[in-house]
Image (cartoon, rainbow, N blue to C red):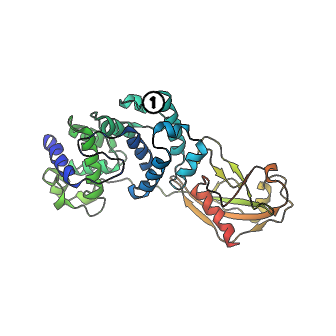
């Protein structure tokens, strides 16, 4: 099977590949900047959601040198809505390092992994697609295709070592970039999570799961743990004269690192905040203001937990800079989706 998979898959790819803005034509090595930018954006995000952001970034910063020269806040603002903002911060850091090296990306997986935000998968993808270097490129789509080809029934995530080894046995020396993208396209277009189109698959005759009639059940997964829920109360303090609101910047490291947010209580697990608990967490010096509770709640799902937030609101004539960062709520700024949902509660008041 191993020797027959790559030729069959590449022949299919030449006829049926997806037309994506970061791709070069079959057999042509792609632009490393476009490949890297798209791969960063595609982490935890779907292709349809990424495409408009990709075009926007290219229009603003057509080269890695232009991106490196951009202020971080501009990059974060352009990123707003894609989520997982650590990716945007690493994107900017990585661009700066590449620019310092003359604007050329390193070509080996080891060198690529030394750059911020580039792990095993992304290093392999960039090396293969942008530099035509043989690499074992394994993302979620590839995991599914390979698990079915080899009928690997052990559940994820434990089966990943076996799947990677099986994928490595298939990777060709010829056209490694096209082959990697062909596997991704097959997983996205044909070998889908539900109702795989086995009759249209160029690898059906080689697929052990299809032969056994278990393709749709693979890859198997351990039962996911239920996400815990955290609770918060956010504070909307508005300057009556300017209309600006009080915000603060989160710590550089950690969840939503360096992003703007409304002041709030801690994000407490398990138990919602009673009204009589909230005043002790108000911005210091604002306790005597006329705080009112907005209707409704904001909900947001993070990777490891769910967040439920309520909003308290007040107005002041004092300069907001006494307490933090004055911010125009109508400005085009990098506001995390979770915070934007909290802010939206003010419109219901």
Q: Quadrant of the N terminus?
A: top left
Q: Is residue 258 left or right of residue 53?
A: right
Residue 152 in view (yes/no): no
Q: Is residue 293 left or right of residue 13?
A: right
The residue at the point 50 percent across, 44 percent down is: 87
Q: Is residue 162 above or below residue 222?
A: above
- Count of labels in the image: 1
Q: What is the crowding at mark 1: few (fewer than 14 residues within 10 Å), some, or many (at least 20)?
A: few
Residue 306, position as x, y percentages in the image: 55, 58
Q: Quadrant of the C terminus?
A: bottom right
Residue 68, position as x, y percentages in the image: 52, 37
Question: Which residue position is annotated with label 1?
Answer: 114
Residue 52 in view (yes/no): yes
The residue at the point 35 percent across, 29 percent down is: 108
The residue at the point 53 percent across, 51 percent down is: 79
Q: Is residue 60 left or right of residue 120?
A: right
Query: Which quarter of the picture shows residue 159?
Result: top left
Residue 91, position as x, y percentages in the image: 50, 41
Query: Of all residues shown, which one is farthest toward the right?
Result: 288
Q: Is residue 295 above or below residue 18?
A: below
Q: Is residue 312 left or right of residue 156?
A: right
Residue 15, position as x, y percentages in the image: 19, 53
Secondary element type, mark 1: loop
């Amino acid at each position: 099977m191993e020797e027959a998979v790559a030729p069959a898959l590449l022949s299919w790819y030449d006829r049926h590949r997806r037309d994506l803005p970061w791709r070069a034509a079959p057999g042509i090595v792609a632009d490393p900047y476009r490949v890297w930018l798209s791969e960063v954006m595609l982490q935890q995000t779907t292709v349809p959601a990424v495409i408009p952001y990709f075009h926007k970034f290219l229009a603003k910063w057509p080269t890695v040198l232009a991106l490196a020269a951009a202020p971080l806040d501009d990059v974060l603002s352009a990123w707003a809505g894609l989520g997982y903002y650590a990716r945007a911060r690493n994107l900017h850091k990585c661009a700066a390092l590449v620019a310092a090296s003359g604007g050329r990306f390193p070509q080996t997986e080891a060198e690529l992994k030394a750059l911020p935000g580039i792990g095993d998968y992304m290093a392999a993808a960039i090396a293969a697609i942008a530099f035509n270097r043989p690499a074992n490129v394994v993302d979620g789509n590839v995991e599914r295709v390979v698990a079915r080809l080899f009928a690997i029934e052990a559940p994820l995530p434990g089966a990943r070592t076996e799947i990677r080894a099986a994928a490595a046995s298939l990777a060709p020396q010829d056209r490694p970039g096209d082959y990697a993208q062909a596997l991704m396209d097959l997983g996205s277009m044909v070998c889908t999570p539900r109702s795989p189109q086995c009759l249209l698959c160029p690898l059906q005759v080689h697929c052990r799961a299809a032969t056994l009639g278990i393709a749709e059940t693979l890859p198997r997964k351990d039962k996911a743990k239920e996400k815990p829920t955290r609770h918060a109360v956010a504070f909307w303090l508005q300057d009556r004269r300017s209309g600006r609101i009080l915000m603060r910047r989160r710590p550089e490291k950690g969840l939503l690192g360096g992003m703007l947010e409304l002041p709030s209580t801690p994000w407490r697990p398990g138990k919602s905040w009673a009204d009589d608990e909230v005043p002790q967490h108000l911005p210091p010096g604002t306790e005597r203001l006329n705080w009112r509770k907005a209707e409704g709640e904001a909900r947001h799902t993070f990777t490891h937990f769910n967040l439920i937030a309520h909003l308290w609101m007040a107005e002041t004539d004092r300069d907001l800079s006494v307490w933090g960062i004055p911010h125009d709520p109508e400005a085009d700024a990098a506001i995390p989706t979770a915070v934007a949902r909290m802010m939206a509660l003010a419109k219901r008041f």
